[in-house]
Image (tube, rainbow, N blue to C red):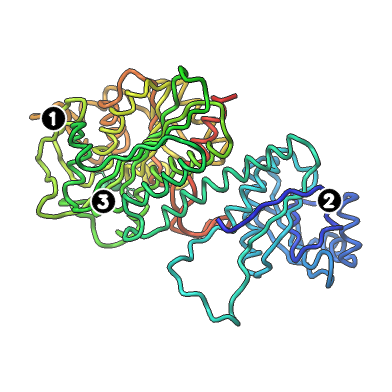
């Protein structure tokens, strides 16, 4: 990430900045700090509020031109009438940062009156989110047309240890989310399974984590027939990457995070329609989320053991691809009747969930862009949360809520299991259109041992096909926040 974040304990009116972002609630009123700022803006702030040109509604913005020196511009950003939380502060800061990118100010200061520690954390996350872009593959415009990218953001906050800690946590989350978003946005001819090895080794080196990398031969040795069935359609080397963060006592059972890493999903022999297939470059978002979370956990030095496992390949139709009707044996010995090669994510996850058992997990959480059905059921605003153990599901829901990545619980009753009974194998790979996300989760459950487990279907939430205002069209960073808040809460 090219943005550097700073923390400063100065009055907003004394900032020497090309852009001061001022985050205000609905029906804003002047306090002493704003009154001082108003003087440096020649009275423009007070006049604007009196005229009600700016009312502080959510996402509302107004740019005030400032002086030659000091506060050179002020951008008012509304946060609406909802309570001040990390999520509302994050959103406003991201809008400010996006505006700074458009203006080309290069730097900005962020001020939120009476900011709580949570709000400070949110401002740091939001600044990172709003300045994020993936421009590697674009030819830069001519020098004269170039705008400065946002390279520094300074958060104004009280001089306390808790404010500093909150700020650093926000920076750590921003960095983790940037890793996930970058992997998501990279096209599938750039983001390949080997890319997860590269990113994983960088994270491991930065934070002293243990790294394990497996290829096709290792998967064969481990009898991971389900993962290999998907990978057999591509000549590209599949990769299973494991990162181990040893932050807790050696005998502490780890939290294991598992991610689906399909660099591209054509559907395979059960090929997808051409329209909108390009979005399937995001089919690695679960794995991207695990990578991003491991980066944040490493930066935060959380005193807990965490293992991240991702499985990465590409689902292709080819002469060697697996086919509907094939019966495949997974690494726990169970046989799977393949029905639709487009249900590839659950095949990869099956072997990863079996592997997770080896770590003697306290809990396993997997994340995957698993089903189109979850998009139909929950749309783009809620992560589908599945699990048999209600208390762990609640823990994950609380983490998602706190992270601003809300989830919603889905049923997993045995009744649905009828739908994945096979005539020839131990389990049928899919259960048809009805309850498609639920039968997918029940399929995964066949490969879960006795450990507590929660499955996150992020097909509707890991990327957005439209500009959401606070973040552009493309990757959202979900589920990095949910993973991190879960682990953070467990570490407390
Ligand atoms: N990666 C897709 C799910 C998906 C769909 C993600 C839309 C994001 C947006 C997954 O591999 C898939 O193709 N699932 C099938 C399962 C079906 C064949 C049982 C689906 O949802 O149609
Ligand atoms: Mn698929
Ligand atoms: Zn897929």
In the displayed structure, 359 sits above or below 2; it is: above
Q: Which residue is mark 2?
A: 10
Left or right: 379 in relation to 316: right
Q: Secondary structure at mark 1?
A: loop
Decide which of tag 2 and tag 3 comes sooner along the chain: 2
Gap in angstroms between the C-alphas marked 1 and 3? 26 Å
In the displayed structure, 74 sits above or below 418; it is: below
In the displayed structure, 223 sits above or below 358; it is: below
Residue 453 position in % (x across, y down):
38, 25
Whether the residues at callouts 1 and 3 have beta carbons within 8 Å, the answer is no
Residue 83 placement: quadrant: top right
| Label disc, if present, on residue 422 of the rendered structure | 1
Decide which of tag 1 and tag 3 comes sooner along the chain: 3
Q: Residues within 10 Å of mark 3 (few under 14, many from 20)?
A: many
Q: Residues within 10 Å of mark 2 (few under 14, many from 20)?
A: some
For image coordinates 46% across by 65% down, the residue present is 136
Residue 44 position in % (x across, y down):
85, 66
């Amino acid at each position: 990430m090219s943005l550097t974040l700073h923390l400063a304990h100065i009055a907003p009116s004394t900032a020497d900045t090309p852009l001061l972002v001022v985050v205000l609630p609905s029906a804003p009123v002047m306090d002493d700090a704003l009154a001082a700022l108003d003087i440096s803006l020649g009275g423009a702030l007070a006049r604007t509020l009196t005229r009600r040109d700016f009312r502080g509604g959510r996402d509302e913005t107004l740019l005030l031109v400032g002086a030659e020196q000091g506060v050179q511009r002020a951008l008012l950003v509304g946060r609406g009438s909802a309570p001040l939380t990390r999520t509302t502060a994050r959103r406003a800061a991201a809008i400010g940062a996006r505006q700074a990118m458009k203006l080309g100010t290069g730097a900005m200061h962020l001020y939120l009156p009476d900011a709580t520690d949570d709000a400070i954390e949110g401002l740091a996350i939001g600044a990172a989110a709003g300045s994020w872009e993936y421009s590697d593959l674009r030819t830069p415009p001519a020098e004269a047309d170039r705008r400065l990218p946002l390279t520094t953001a300074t958060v104004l906050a009280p001089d306390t240890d808790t404010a500093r800690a909150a700020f650093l946590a926000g920076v750590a989350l921003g960095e983790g989310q940037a890793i996930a978003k970058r992997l998501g946005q990279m096209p599938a001819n750039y983001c390949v399974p080997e890319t997860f090895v590269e990113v994983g080794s960088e994270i491991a080196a930065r934070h002293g984590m243990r790294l394990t990398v497996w290829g096709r031969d290792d998967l064969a040795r481990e009898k991971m027939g389900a993962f290999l069935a998907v990978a057999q359609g591509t000549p590209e080397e599949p990769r299973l990457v494991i990162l181990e963060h040893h932050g807790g006592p050696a005998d502490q059972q780890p939290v294991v995070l598992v991610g689906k890493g399909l660099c591209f999903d054509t559907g395979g022999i059960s090929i997808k329609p051409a329209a909108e297939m390009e979005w399937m470059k995001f089919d690695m978002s679960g794995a991207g989320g695990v990578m991003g979370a491991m980066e944040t956990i490493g930066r935060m030095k959380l005193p807990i053991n965490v293992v991240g496992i991702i499985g990465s390949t590409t689902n292709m139709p080819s002469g060697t691809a697996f086919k509907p009707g094939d019966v495949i044996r997974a690494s726990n010995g169970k046989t799977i009747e393949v029905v639709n090669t487009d249900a590839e994510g659950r095949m990869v996850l099956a072997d990863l969930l079996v592997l997770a058992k080896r770590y003697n997990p306290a809990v396993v959480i997997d994340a995957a862009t698993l089903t189109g059905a979850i998009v139909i059921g929950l749309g783009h605003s809620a992560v589908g949360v599945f699990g048999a153990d209600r208390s762990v599901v609640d823990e994950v829901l609380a983490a998602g809520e706190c992270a601003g990545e809300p989830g919603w619980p889905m049923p997993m009753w045995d009744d649905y299991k009828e739908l994945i009974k096979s005539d020839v194998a131990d389990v049928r790979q899919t259960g048809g259109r009805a309850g498609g996300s639920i039968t997918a989760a029940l399929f995964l459950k066949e490969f879960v041992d006795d450990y507590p487990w929660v499955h996150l279907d992020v097909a509707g939430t890991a990327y957005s096909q439209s500009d959401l205002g606070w973040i552009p069209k493309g990757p959202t960073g979900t589920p990095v926040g949910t993973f991190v808040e879960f682990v953070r809460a467990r570490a407390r």
